[in-house]
Image: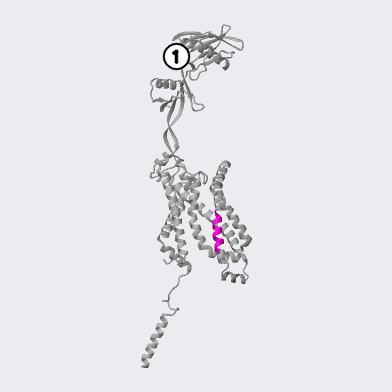
Amino acid sequence: MAEDKNKYKYEDNSSEENLSLNDDRRVKTLSPGAMVMKRFFRNRLAVLGLVMLGLMFIFSFVGGMISPYRQDEQFYTYTFLEKEYVAVTRNEDFRYVAAEGKEFGSAAQAQFLLAQMTGKEEFTYKDVAYGVTEEGKDFYTLSTDGEVIAIAYKDIVNAEDGLEDPVFAVKLEALRSYTNDQTGAFSADGEEYELDGDGNIIKGGQVIGYISRFVVQSKENGVVIPRSFKERLEEALDGDVEEFIYIGEDGEEHNYPIAYDASAKVWSVKQETETYVYDQYSQPSKTHPLGTDTNGMDMLTRLMYGGRVSLIIGFIVVIIETVLGVILGGISGYFGKWVDNLIMRIVDIFYCIPSMPLIIILGAAMDGMRVDPQIRMLYLMLILGFLGWPGIARLVRGQILSLREQEFMTAAEACGISVSRRIFKHLIPNVIPQLIVTCTMSLGSIILMESTLSFLGLGVKFPFASWGNIINDVNNAYVLTNYWFIWIPAGFCILISVLGFNFVGDGLRDAFDPRMKR
């Protein structure tokens, strides 16, 4: 019996040892931080959001470092472009040339037109009688005292390439013959000339000028249009063709499309030339997996750097908001009374400020002052942070109002701990869980705000990339419908980032809630 009792006693002692807290098999309890992490990682959406954010950070920061291109690197290509080369009109208005040493001004020209339309052979201007003589079709001479002082014409005498404009006497005699369908020799200014059937004015066997009713004006400064081009152009206009080919002085063939503006009665002639230009809107390829944008920049690289800018702006704005909100909210909640009243009225004033119109005005002002794009980003972060702190200040104030009356704060005060230490070492740490949740969820809103401002041209400026100003390239329906690779990837990155921050914020809110059982 004694042995049995000892046996039972030994068994009782062993059971006590099994329940001892010093045993390795004791029940383990989790710290508050570990409990939060456990609840967070049980939330599948929160884990998905964390993965999404991790991928976006890797894409933006690591991808930007390994990309072979810079964010502002532009690519070029050779392509055929149509640019307006000349404008052509068929002259239907009278033009005037006065003899050497004579004048025939605009007022006298108006008097001539009245006389010509009414069939008069003379008119008077400033007590001077002018004789009007019709020399040929659409060609008149104007004389005083029997001396020709000016001519009015519609067919134009042009100088041969590289030669000076024919003198007045030559123009007079050449037009007199041309408008009467006469060819052959004529005399002018004591010298012999010849007019052939093509309207060429010849002197000593050399063509010095020609007559044509077409007026060809170059659209490029300093460019002289050769006669051979004008003749080829006239043939095309007479043949009513839509384009023609001309071999230029460089020996290259160029195609010249012709378009007629009936309202202005002008032919617009464009030139197709091989030009070294930005490789705009090139389709996705092995070299550029997401193509290029309107400035010939690699879209994939721009997306990487754009994500870096958008995420950095989001975090810096949140830091600014949090610092201002924690300081002012902590002071307001702890001291109360008139201090609380003053800070809360300041918060009310900030809530009444129309943020978007104010940001638009400031953005337009920075555009007018041509602020450097890098400085502009700093201003943008400061403005967004300065306008966003009141919400965090109210959150911190509300939490501190409930915490400052608790026993641990009474004990801290009794121990003589300073006010600043009570606020920032004892009160603020108890507000951090709610701050983390609020800041995480506000990151998505800030990224959306920055993207909206950049899309409107008020945020991040070229050459820096952000997801918002990348989408800003889609400024017309044609780009929107034909170049999907410009805006869909940037919109997808914004969607993934904002959803990721929202999922993580929801997960943290649930994880910090002690009432959550899962």
Left or right of residue 98, residue 280 in this image: left
- Seen from the viewer's position, the closer of residues 222 and 315 is 315
Q: Quadrant of residue 322?
A: bottom right
Q: Tell me the amino acid under the disc marked 1.
A: Gly
Q: Where is residue 419 in the image (x, y as percent from the top left)?
A: 62, 65
Check disc 1 and report its element: helix, strand or loop.
loop
Q: In which quarter of the image is residue 83?
A: top left
Q: Where is residue 72 in the image (x, y as percent from the top left)?
A: 48, 44
Is residue 20 among what the camera can see?
yes
- Seen from the viewer's position, the closer of residues 355 and 23 is 355
Quick check: 506 above or below 363? below
Q: Give the residues drawn in magenta, as a range.
A: 388-399
Q: Residue under circle 1?
A: 199
Is residue 167 among what the camera can see?
no
Left or right of residue 337, residue 438 in this image: left
409 within the magenta span: no
Residue at coordinates 50% horizontally, 46% vertically from top-left?
Answer: 454
For the C terminus, the image quarter is bottom left
Q: Position of residue 59 (x, y in %)?
A: 44, 52
Residue at coordinates 40% horizontally, 83% vertically from top-left?
Answer: 14
- Seen from the viewer's position, the closer of residues 93 and 311 is 93
Quick check: 499 above or below 147? below
For the N terminus, the image quarter is bottom left
396 within the magenta span: yes
Left or right of residue 370, residue 496 in this image: left
**Which secondary structure class fits the magenta region best?**
helix
Residue at coordinates 51% horizontally, 26% vertically from top-left?
Answer: 222
